[in-house]
Each structure stands twice: as structure tokens, then as C-alpha cells.
């Protein structure tokens, strides 16, 4: 029943956006010199904005993020290491991130934006989460996700702060990866070192319910990869600012002990 209510609520939000959605389709057509307004196919309503696959001539040409002022999503609790930016700032931030990340192949390529919308070129990848079901182990996927986050940190100089297997994309061979959905910003006072550590740990934390109980012991392969990503500033972080968002890991005795070997101030 709860799922049905969520679906009905989401459809109502989308119905209220029908006028702006049609106008945006026209603006995209003009900006991209399309022969007709593209079709916008809803891709889900989990975030704070509406997201659509953009089709022209029967082929997908991009993805559109559109601010939906009618959506009512809970804000992050106080004390978290991340905050949700205001509507126009979300668009501006993601456009900037994609512009910086696309050169390394780590994000989609941004093409056009308005105050309340962002259009990116279609990237024929899918979320790592889609490989979880039926996989013999989730840890290879988490290893790929962390490796992608490390590239974002190292090559682009940015953090994600909402890392999950749903926000890491891969091609069908899982040899190329990209990151999407940068709608959160680091909270004031959270250092870049803390952000980078949080990205890696949040990836595992957000996947906790998908990890089989028998596999929840600390993965030595994943910890070794994390160890290789750490610089001195990351190793020296305190966990007071990022810890409140990592309870699944930090309240697990085995994980806390394993992480304390990498982060002395956690002990």
C-alpha cells in the first residue's frame, strides 16, 4: 500500500509539471536544432528533481534533469556531512561537475542548461546496482565503484558525497565507469580529505542491505584498495563530521576494528 501511495504521489507531481515539461522540450529542441521537440520519458522519482530520458527520432540522445517545485522530499538531517543545495544551485553544481568530469570520461557530457534544467548527452552505461542481483558477490562491484571514486578525487579534484552503486555507471563490459547525480554538496567544515574518505565508506554503507550477511565481514581486497587510495590528510581524519552518516559500518565491531588500522584517530 505504501508503494502504491508513493507511485500516486509521484504521478501527481509529474502531472503538475506538464506545462513546464512541454516548454523545456521546446527549449531543448531549439538549443540542439532538433526538427521537433523531443520525447521526455520519466526515469524515476527517487531524487529531489525529475529526471527523463530524452528521445528524438526514436533514439535516446540524452538525459534531462528538471527541477520540480511540486516534489516534497525530506531534507538531510542536521549533522550530516552533506547538504542538499537549492534548486538552481543543484543545476549549476551538476553542470560544473559534469563539465570537469567529462574530460576524463568520468561523467556524462553536459550540453545545455537553464535555471531549472540540465541536459546531458546520452551515455550508454547502466548503474552497477543492476549487476547486483544474481552476482556471486557484491564486492567486485564495490571495488569498481571505489576505483571510480578515487579517479574522481585524483583526476578531477572533486568528491561525490552521495556515493552508491546506483550512482556509478558502467558500460556492458564494466571496463569504463562514470558517476552521476551530484545533487548533494559537502556540509560546511567538512574537509576534502574527509569528503574523500566518506565517499569510499558511504559506497559500502549505502549498499549494506544488498550485502549478504555471510559477506558483511570486512573485505580484505576492498580494504587493501582503500588503503592504496589514502593520502596523509585522509589517514589523519577524525570521524566526528562523517561518522553520523556511517552507522552501519562504525557500529559493526569487525568493521570498526579494520578501519581503525587505517585511520588511527578512529581507534
Image (spheres, grey):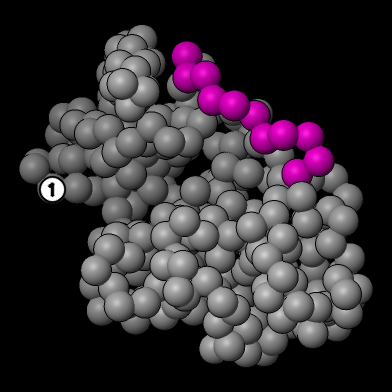
Q: Which quarter of the figure has residue 124?
A: bottom left
Nearer to me, 148 or 81: 81
Say whether residue 243 is left or right of residue 125: right
In terms of image quadrants, where is residue 83?
A: top right
Quarter containing the C terminus: bottom right
Q: Who is closer to the viewer here, 211 or 102?
A: 211
Specify whether 213 is left or right of 36.
right
The correct choice, above or below, for 147 with respect to 102 in the image is below
Q: Position of residue 147 (x, y in %)?
A: 53, 78
Quarter of the image with the N terminus is top left
Q: Could one spot residue 185 in this view of the protein?
A: yes
Q: How many C-alpha atoms fall within 10 Å of the one at disc 1: few (<14), some, or many (≥20)?
A: few
Part of the protein shown in magenta: 70-80
- Disc 1: which residue: 59
Q: Secondary structure at mark 1?
A: strand
For the residue pair 78 and 31, the one nearer the viewer reads as 78
Residue shown at 72% from the left, 60% from the top: 251
Q: Is residue 109 magenta?
A: no
At 43% across and 36% down in the image, what residue appears? Answer: 46
Across and down, in percent, residue 160 comes to 61, 57
Left or right: residue 171 compared with residue 85: left
Which residue is found at the position 42% from the left and 60% from the top?
Answer: 210
Percent from the top left, x then y, of residue 45? 38, 32
State whether residue 202 is above or below residue 149: above
- Residue 79 falls within the magenta-colored stretch: yes
Is the magenta region chiefly helix, strand or loop? loop
- Asked whether, in this view, residue 192 is left or right of residue 222, the answer is right
Amino acid at each position: 500500500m505504501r508503494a502504491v501511495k508513493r507511485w500516486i504521489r509521484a504521478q501527481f507531481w509529474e502531472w503538475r509539471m506538464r506545462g513546464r515539461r512541454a516548454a523545456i522540450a521546446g527549449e531543448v529542441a531549439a538549443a540542439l536544432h532538433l526538427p521537433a521537440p523531443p520525447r521526455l520519458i520519466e526515469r524515476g522519482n527517487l531524487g529531489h528533481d525529475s529526471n527523463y530520458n530524452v528521445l528524438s527520432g526514436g533514439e535516446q540522445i540524452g538525459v534531462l534533469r528538471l527541477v520540480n517545485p511540486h516534489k516534497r522530499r525530506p531534507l538531510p538531517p542536521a549533522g550530516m556531512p552533506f547538504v542538499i543545495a537549492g534548486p538552481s544551485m543543484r543545476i549549476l553544481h551538476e553542470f560544473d561537475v559534469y563539465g570537469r568530469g567529462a574530460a576524463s570520461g568520468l561523467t556524462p557530457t553536459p550540453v545545455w542548461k537553464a535555471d531549472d534544467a540540465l541536459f546531458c548527452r546520452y551515455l550508454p552505461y547502466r548503474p552497477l546496482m543492476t549487476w547486483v542481483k544474481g552476482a556471486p558477490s557484491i564486492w567486485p562491484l564495490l571495488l569498481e565503484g571505489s576505483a571510480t571514486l578515487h579517479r574522481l578525487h585524483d583526476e578531477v579534484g572533486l568528491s561525490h558525497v552521495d556515493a552508491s552503486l546506483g550512482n556509478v555507471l558502467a558500460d556492458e563490459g564494466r571496463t569504463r565507469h562514470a558517476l552521476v547525480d551530484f545533487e548533494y554538496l559537502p556540509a560546511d567544515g567538512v574537509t576534502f580529505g574527509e569528503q574523500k574518505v566518506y565517499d569510499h565508506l558511504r559506497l559500502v554503507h549505502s549498499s549494506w542491505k544488498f550485502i549478504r550477511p555471510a559477506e558483511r565481514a570486512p573485505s580484505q581486497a576492498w580494504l587493501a584498495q582503500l588503503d592504496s587510495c589514502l593520502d596523509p590528510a585522509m589517514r589523519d581524519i577524525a570521524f566526528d563530521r562523517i561518522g553520523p552518516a556511517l552507522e552501519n559500518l562504525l557500529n559493526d565491531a569487525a568493521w570498526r576494528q579494520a578501519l581503525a588500522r587505517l585511520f588511527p584517530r578512529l581507534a
